[in-house]
């Protein structure tokens, strides 16, 4: 049996080859299904909003000791920058206004694993936001939508809020070009079972 990290890495490789790393819906759907078939049957996709901030913005939020009100997307004074994907604030041109991650229940004993393979969608290297796929422990309160999760990655801060009742990603245009994605899921899972 493969470790969670091995499975995630194998899926990322296939997503990259298939040019699917810019679609959180497709990537997270594939990852959740592969995990279910390779030893993590309770894995599931979860809708979230996420804000990524660079070091100057993180410093300002920390100094004011109140990150309950997050900044809007954009560049601000003193080199501060925030990138936002928010279910409550759809962006024109996006097929679906949210962000999708995968949860593996109780992976870290009483805490769950949250896997965000497409957080790189928020990358803005010229603004100091450089993010790679991540797997982090999260509390049950976050998964249920009653608490925010904050994660520090390098010099960036990520603020996640889950929307557990939201399944509108299933209706998005790119959610499951079903036949092709199901074939990809089956191939990845079969390859992992052979190794």
Image (cartoon, grey):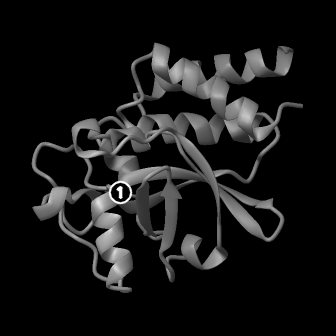
Q: Quadrant of residue 40?
A: top right
State whether residue 86 appears in this view: no
Query: How far from the left and from the top, in percent, is residue 94?
Result: 19, 44
Vertical relation: 116 (above or below) 181: below
Front position in the image: 108 or 183: 108
Vertical relation: 25 (above or below) 156: above
Front position in the image: 176 or 159: 159
- Tell me which residue sits at (28%, 81%) in the image: 69
Query: How far from the left and from the top, in percent, is residue 20?
Result: 41, 25
Front position in the image: 157 or 51: 157
Question: In the visual, does 49 lie left or right of 75?
Answer: right
Question: In the visual, does 72 lie left or right of 86?
Answer: left
Question: In the visual, does 105 lie left or right of 121?
Answer: right
Characterize the local packing of mark 1: few (<14), some (14-19) or many (20 or more) Cα atoms within 10 angstroms. few
Q: Quadrant of residue 89?
A: bottom left
* The residue positioned farthest toward the right in the image shown: 1
Query: How far from the left and from the top, in percent, is residue 104?
Result: 69, 54
Q: Secondary structure at mark 1?
A: helix
- Tell me which residue sits at (48%, 38%) in the image: 132
Query: How far from the left and from the top, in percent, is residue 169?
Result: 37, 51
Residue where numbered disc 1 is placed: 168
- Tell me which residue sits at (80%, 71%) in the image: 110
State whether residue 148 appears in this view: yes
Vertical relation: 128 (above or below) 188: below
Q: Quadrant of the C terminus?
A: top right
Q: Quadrant of the N terminus?
A: top right
Question: In the visual, does 137 lie left or right of 64?
Answer: right
């Amino acid at each position: 049996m493969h470790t969670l990290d091995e499975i995630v890495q194998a899926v990322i490789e296939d997503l990259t080859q298939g040019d699917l790393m810019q679609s959180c819906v497709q990537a997270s759907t594939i990852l959740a299904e592969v995990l279910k078939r390779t030893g993590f049957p309770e894995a599931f996709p979860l809708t979230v909003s996420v804000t990524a901030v660079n070091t100057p913005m993180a410093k300002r939020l920390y100094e004011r000791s109140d990150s309950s009100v997050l900044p809007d997307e954009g560049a601000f004074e003193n080199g501060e920058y925030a990138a936002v994907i928010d279910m409550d604030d759809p962006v024109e041109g996006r097929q679906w206004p949210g962000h999708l991650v995968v949860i593996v229940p109780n992976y870290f004993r009483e805490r769950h694993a949250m896997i965000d393979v497409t957080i790189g969608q928020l990358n803005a290297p010229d603004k100091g936001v450089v993010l790679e796929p991540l797997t982090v422990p999260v509390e049950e309160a976050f998964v249920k939508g009653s608490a925010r999760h904050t994660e520090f990655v390098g010099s960036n801060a990520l603020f996640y809020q889950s929307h557990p009742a939201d399944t509108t990603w299933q209706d998005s245009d790119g959610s499951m070009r079903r036949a092709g994605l199901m074939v990809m899921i089956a191939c990845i899972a079969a390859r992992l079972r052979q190794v």
